[in-house]
Amino acid sequence: MKNKYDVVIIGSGIIGSLTARYLSRYNLSVLVVEKEIDVGMCPSSANSAIIHAGYDPKPGTMKAEMNAKGNRIWHSLAPELGIVFEKTGSLVVATSEDDVSKLKQLQEQAAANNIPGVEILDKEQLKTREPLINPEAVAALWAPTAAVLDPFGAVLAAAENAVANGVTYLFETEFTDFIIDSGRITGIRTTKGDFICRRVINAAGLYADEVTRKAGARIDFSITPRKGSYLIFDPMKITLKNVIFPVPSEMGKGILASTTTHGNVLIGPNNEACDGKNDTATGEDGLMEVFNGAKRLIPSLDLKNVIAQYCGVRAKGNGTGDFIVEKASEVQGLINLLGIESPGFASAPAIALRVIELLKESGEKLEEKPDWNPVRKPFPHFHRMSNVERKKLIAKNPAYGRIVCRCEEITEGEILDAIHSPVPARTYDGIKRRTWMGTGRCQGAFDYPRVIAILSRELGIPAEEVTKKGKGSELVYRGTKECAQ
């Protein structure tokens, strides 16, 4: 295994993977180290899936700058990487006349942050735009540049494009320390050995504070994780047209109700204390807080139509609450990305490009590759195709004619694509995130046995070694007929 690189990126979330993708444009050897078994197994794939317009951050902050730039970039980057991206716009809904003044404040912030097209809608205009809105709503702030995407799909697309252009990803590889010589970083230590490099980019998200302290940099910076729960509704029972926020408070943007690229209604998040950075457990109190909060926006929500729930954790940093994107002053060769909470996903491409600028300022010579390919072509999505397109696809490969997940119409051909992609899926959840398999009304009840058999066959491992999300999450431990022996 190669152990010398020009640049090492710690973390494979959306910012780490987009940074890798942009760096793949240059004649550099780049390594991404990730402690998990797959990309994006972090806040990057457990969030609200929204590309925020940019009216919310305080003008003059890095958050405001990165959000505004990132939003503009996503509108061209998403089609370039084959990411499903829907330009929904967003609404901030006032349910009393007292809240209308707050909408005007947000509109002024939007102007200060150079966010185009932001306007205040009256009650009738709001009702036309979103028929299911609370009838007590009196006005709303409309931001047309907001959008929704599949957050894991975006991470995967960036990573696949990076790999196609020469970047190396190393999974189940945990960073443990820096190698420092005379005040300069010369490499990192990991659970899979040492890697020599000139530059390290700390994109470790929730763990970025622990990484930077290993270098003696920003030793006073710390991340206090906060978690938020979400509920997902059956699209056969309810759909929305927009992303809908309440008027924000000091605690944040509040509990939203949103459409998604998969057609579900998504509600959440709340703001709860965590029992550590890995605490993604949901509880009845938190979920009911989310449900009751979202019903103030959409009264027709019904708990009977919930099909899934999940929890995401925010990397909330201490200090000003602003993003930190900088060259570490205490040691040479380290770029820190700290406290990247909401709107981190929307800001990600702008932050990644800022990293490129910081590398140039540090003296890194970036020579462009003549054969760099910025386009990533996605694999076929059977459920999004017309019957004519499906027929042609099946004629080329009969595996696309075998439905494995009935609710979402996911085929064996798509599962094979996921397993043999540039960033391959090696677990049930890896396939689930790539294909949306197992996310419908039956929540995988039909597909589990078939997927276990396919993973066993394609990876050349016994069925007992197939896992849900990595070691320790094995799905079966013996065949049913062995019980009688």
Image (cartoon, rainbow, N blue to C red):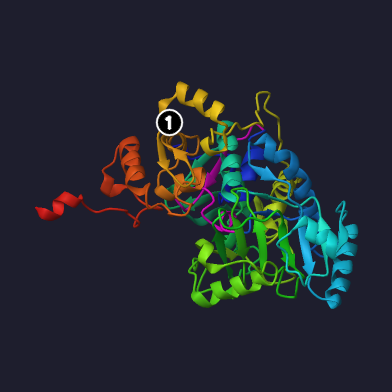
Whether residue 208 is situated above or below residue 422 in the rendered picture: below
Q: Is residue 328 visible from the viewing direction of this image?
A: no
Rendered residue at 41%/30% (across/down)? 399
> Which region of the structure is painted magenta?
26-47
Q: Is the magenta stretch mostly helix, strand or loop?
A: loop
Whether residue 289 is situated above or below residue 59 in the rendered picture: below
Decide if residue 76 is on the left or right side of residue 181.
right
Considering depth in this image, is 230 or 426 the residue closer to the camera? 230
Whether residue 110 is situated above or below residue 84 in the rendered picture: below
Considering depth in this image, is 408 or 361 the residue closer to the camera? 408
Q: Magenta segment: does it hold 33?
A: yes
Considering depth in this image, is 190 or 131 the residue closer to the camera? 131
Rendered residue at 65%/24% (across/down)? 371
Residue at the spot of label 1: 401
Number of numbered labels in the structure image? 1
Q: Looking at the rendering, in which quadrant would you find the N terminus?
A: top left
- Locate residue 234, reporting x and y percent: 54, 56
**Crowdedness of circle 1 by 10 Å Cα count: few (<14), some, many (20+)?**
some
Q: Magenta segment: does it hold 136?
A: no
Q: Is residue 52 visible from the viewing direction of this image?
A: yes
Considering depth in this image, is 481 or 163 the residue closer to the camera? 481
- Locate residue 315, reporting x and y percent: 62, 64
What amino acid does circle 1 point to? Gly
- Locate residue 297, reporting x and y percent: 70, 68
